[in-house]
Image: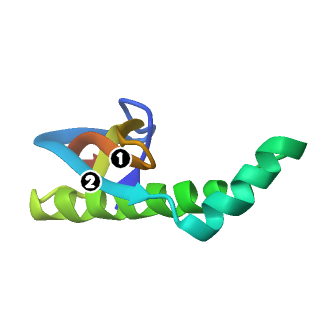
Amino acid sequence: MLIVTTETVPGHKITEACGLARGNVIRAKHIGNDFVAGLRNIVGGEVTEYTKMMSEAREQAQDRMIAHAERLGANAVVGVRFTTSTISQGAAEILAFGTAVRLEKA
């Protein structure tokens, strides 16, 4: 499955738009990580616990988007974007979305 942020793929042509492909995940903070993050907030620096958590959440959202695109019959997703929103204090949603398409070499 080819995943790109552009609307086109050099050397390929879109033969069919299959629809919107999306995948999301909601992650909540872990009390242990929150404690360590609070300490880092005082002294400064990257909060690596949250960086890792959000990176894993993006991967999971992307995997779910790919699975959705495959169910739509696509072999690529173009115009891929990620967005984040706060669900509640301590929980965030990551959404990956794009246009599921069928590509063939030009």
Residue depicted at 28% across the width and 38% down the height: 13
Q: Nearer the viewer, residue 57 or 1?
A: 57
Q: CA distance from mark 2 to mark 1?
A: 10 Å
User: What amino acid is labelled 1 in the image?
Assistant: Glu
**Residue 51: x and y, percent?**
65, 54
In the rendered image, the vertical position of residue 101 relative to residue 36, given as above or below: above
Q: Where's residue 16, x and y in %?
A: 12, 42
Amino acid of disc 2: Gly
Q: Quadrant of the N terminus?
A: bottom left
The residue positioned 29% from the left and 53% from the top of the image is 24
The residue that label 2 is drawn on is 23
Q: Which residue is mark 1?
A: 93
Q: Earlier in the sequence, mark 2 or mark 1?
A: 2
Residue 102 visible in the current orientation: no
Horizontal side, residue 30 vs residue 45: left or right: left
Residue 78 on image: x %, y %: 33, 39
Residue 7 vertical position relative to residue 84 in the rendered view, above or below? above
Contact check, label 2 and label 1, Cβ < 8 Å: no
- Point out the residue furthest to the bottom here: 32
Residue 15 image-quadrant placement: top left
Disc 2 on helix, strand or loop?
strand
Viewer-proximal residue among 34 and 2: 34
Most foreground residue, 27 or 59: 27
Q: Nearer the viewer, mark 2 or mark 1?
A: 1
